Image: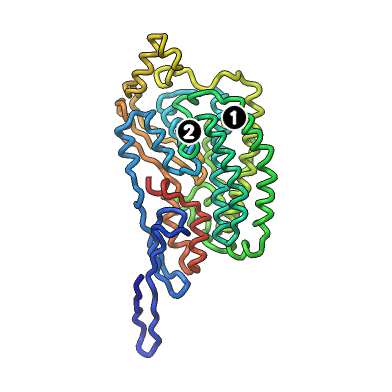
Amino acid sequence: MSDHHIQLPEGSIEKQTTTLNLGPTHPATHGVFQNVLEMDGERIVSATPTVGYIHRAFEKIAERKPYYQITPLTDRLNYCSAPINNIGWHLTVEKLLGIKTPKRVDYLRVIIMELARITDHLICNSVIGVDSGAFTGFLYVMQYRELVYEIYEEICGSRLTTNIGRIGGFERNFTETAFRKINKFLDEYPAVLKEFENLFTRNRIFMERTQGVGAITAERALNYGFTGPNLRAAGVDYDVRVATPYSSYEDFEFSIPVGTTGDTYDRFLVRNAEMWQSLGIIRQAMDKLKDLPADVFHADVPAYYLPDKEDVYSKMEALIYHFKIVMGETDILPGEVYNAVEGANGELGFYLISDGGRSPYRLHFRRPCFIYYQAYPEMVKGAMLSDAIICMSSLNLIAGELDA
């Protein structure tokens, strides 16, 4: 921390500001972020963000890995909703290879992605509550994030960094236990979400702490490249699931919640409303599954999809495919594609160039966090220090996604 003296005209009172480091390891930043703030008392004169504290060079690592080994790297982007990252990557490779997945695979993917969206939003909104002084809501909804993690665990064996699914579908079929836990979540979470909203939405303290804080106009948000809930809170109804549908999202009926002011309060309301929409999408997907064959969980692409272990032990063709896929010897078509999904924080894009080799020639992740973090100094300028904290929480900055 250091002091700066501002030179003013002779005869006037000298004004003093203070440089304050907010982060990179401050508990209120909820991640490894640093903002160098120039403070006039409690008010922020300017903010200079720094990034790169946990930069792990994922894009360069991916350019040295076979395609199927890149999935675990995507877990570490937005780790609050890892399955969306995983499936987004698989969809990108499928677009390059021209793989068309069966409807049942699409619907299973939609269920997982919407569960991931809910867990991401419930963490973000409950943390906004914590930063305004209300801890109860956070503890209440976290037990349902735990239930979703049990669903992940039943499907793929993992919880936080899921590595869920494969190019062409899922590594195994969903069990009856997985469907039972999904139904349990659908039955119990709506009442919990309703009570969570009752705790905050019309709470006078919460409203005064969030309304007008960190506001951004639709025009400025678009200029920065905002997407996702932070853009929709500013009044722009852009959603990748509707603009360029993937995984058969066109088969579902849902609304796009939109705010008006682009402030912390509207970001909170939009994410809450999106959780209700996600619950509706999951119910529709569960109903659609009843009319489809229960044994289909991947596309018929043996050159890219690992065969059953029993077949590997007994059939030469399966052994060959298994060896080629694991050793990265499967031929990948040359080409250039961009594919995006609606991540919990916005448009999560993958720009992939293949030269026909075993690894991508070039891979770029379009991380929504990295893009809208650029607007943070503008959003907190003139605000109080406590407002800067709650504004950062409402943006839902995830350090892993920011740095990559």
Marks 2, 1: nearer the viewer: 1
- Whether residue 128 appears in this view of the structure is yes
The residue beneath circle 2 is 87
- Would you call the spot at circle 2 few (<14 residues within 10 Å), some (14-19), or many (20 or more)? many
Marks 2/1: CA distance?
Answer: 18 Å
- Identify the disc placed on residue 178: 1
At which x and y percent is residue 235? Answer: 57, 53
Percent from the top left, x then y, of residue 94? 44, 27
- Which class describes the residues within 10 Å of circle 1: few (<14), some (14-19), or many (20+)? some
Residue 168 numbered tag = none
Q: Amino acid at mark 1?
A: Ala
Residue 260 appears in the figure: no
In the rendered structure, which amino acid carries the disc numbered 2?
Ile
What residue lies at 34% left-to-right and 76% top-to-bottom? 4
Residue drawn where x is 38% and y is 13% of the image: 319
Q: Residue at x 70, y 45 (%)?
A: 191
**Height in image: 251 above or below 390?**
above
The reply to whether dot 2 and dot 1 touch (C-beta < 8 Å) is no
Q: Position of residue 343 (x, y in %)?
A: 50, 42
Element assignment for label 1: helix
For the N terminus, the image quarter is: bottom left
Give the camera-side residue of 112 and 374: 112
Lateral position of residue 245 relative to residue 64, left or right? right
Q: Earlier in the sequence, mark 2 or mark 1?
A: 2
Residue 85 position, x and y percent, is 46, 38
Q: Residue at x 48, y 32 (%)?
A: 164
Q: Quadrant of the C terminus?
A: top left
Image quadrant where residue 73 sits: top left
Q: Quick one: which residue is furthest to the bottom in this view?
A: 11
- Callout 2: SS: helix
